[in-house]
Amino acid sequence: MSTNRESVHSVESGLVPRYHFVTSLSEWVQGLIISSSKSYPTNSIVEDKGKSFDESILERTVATYLDIRCWAILKWCLASGIPWNVGFVSLGILQSLSRLLDEAYTLMSQDALFYSRGNNIKKTDRDNRRRYFTEDFFAAVHDVAHLLFCRYEGLFRPKLDLWVPSTISCLRIASVFCSSTYIKNNGNILFDLSILILQRFVSFLRSSPNPRKVFQSIVDKILTEAS
């Protein structure tokens, strides 16, 4: 952390060009988010064939990919780097988005995802992660996704292997909203995030040399993974 403070001081002192600072900070926070989403225990919100996890660990720590501050930092980096198209954008962020949507979907499936006044996912003491899944959290994540897809589309071009799991995650989320009263909350940010990713998936299909063949391949993969 001292290194980060020194970096900020260097920027303020004019010793480090703003472009290099934004790029380095973006690379750093993306690395934290991606590695955390791959390695952090899923606890009770993801079924694990009866295996349990010490929930006291979650009470003492906050997984980086669940920390709104990290997504806010990444949002700032992407927004600040638009003039230069920031030099570093990791495709692995799409995997982190899929992880978040999968966990949100599991919460929705387990407890019907009750919303307080149609905004925040209801918090319970039983599931520690739920306290982080607020409207503000998903708003920050949505803003990051929007910047990546709409302002960095030249750099952020996920391949088929990344689109399949993210598409499954989004379809699951959308199905819950469309089959319940959640759809009445038209401004729900979690639903909007899923639709945003699905829209970019459609763009990916359209830009493929052989859309029909790719679509059939994707459908086969989705059916295989969803079964």
Image (cartoon, rainbow, N blue to C red):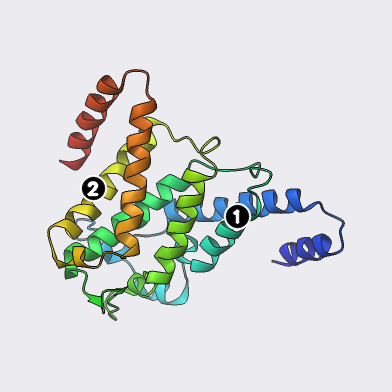
Give the farthest residue toward the left. Answer: 179
Q: Quadrant of residue 104?
A: bottom left
Q: Please state which of the two labelled residues, at mark 2 or mark 1, is closer to the viewer.
A: 1
Answer yes or no: is residue 142 visible.
yes
Task: Kindly identify the amino acid type of the residue bearing the numbered disc 1.
Answer: Ala
The N terminus, quarter of image: bottom right
> Which labelled disc corresponds to residue 10?
none
Which residue shows up at 26% across the image and 65% down it?
Answer: 44
> Which labelled disc corresponds to residue 79?
1
Label 2 – label 1 distance at C-alpha:
28 Å
Decide which of 119, 36 is in the foreground and name it: 119
In-image side of 23 versus 200 (left or right): right
> Which labelled disc corresponds to residue 171?
2
Q: Residues within 10 Å of mark 2 (few under 14, many from 20)?
A: some
Question: Reading the chain from its start, which is encountered first: label 2 or label 1?
Answer: 1
Which residue shows up at 54% across the image and 68% down it?
Answer: 69
Residues at marks 2 and 1 touching, judged by CB atoms closer than 8 Å: no
Q: Quick check: 121 above or below 27?
A: below
In the rendered image, residue 114, in percent from the top left (x then y), is placed at 21, 74
In the rendered image, residue 34, in percent from the top left (x then y), is placed at 49, 51
Task: Kindly identify the amino acid type of the residue bearing the numbered disc 2.
Answer: Leu
In the rendered image, residue 47, in percent from the top left (x then y), is placed at 22, 58
Q: Residues within 10 Å of mark 1 (few under 14, many from 20)?
A: some
Answer yes or no: is residue 34 visible.
no
In the rendered image, residue 79, in percent from the top left (x then y), is placed at 60, 55
Decide which of 216, 92 is in the foreground and name it: 216
SS class of the residue under badge 2?
helix
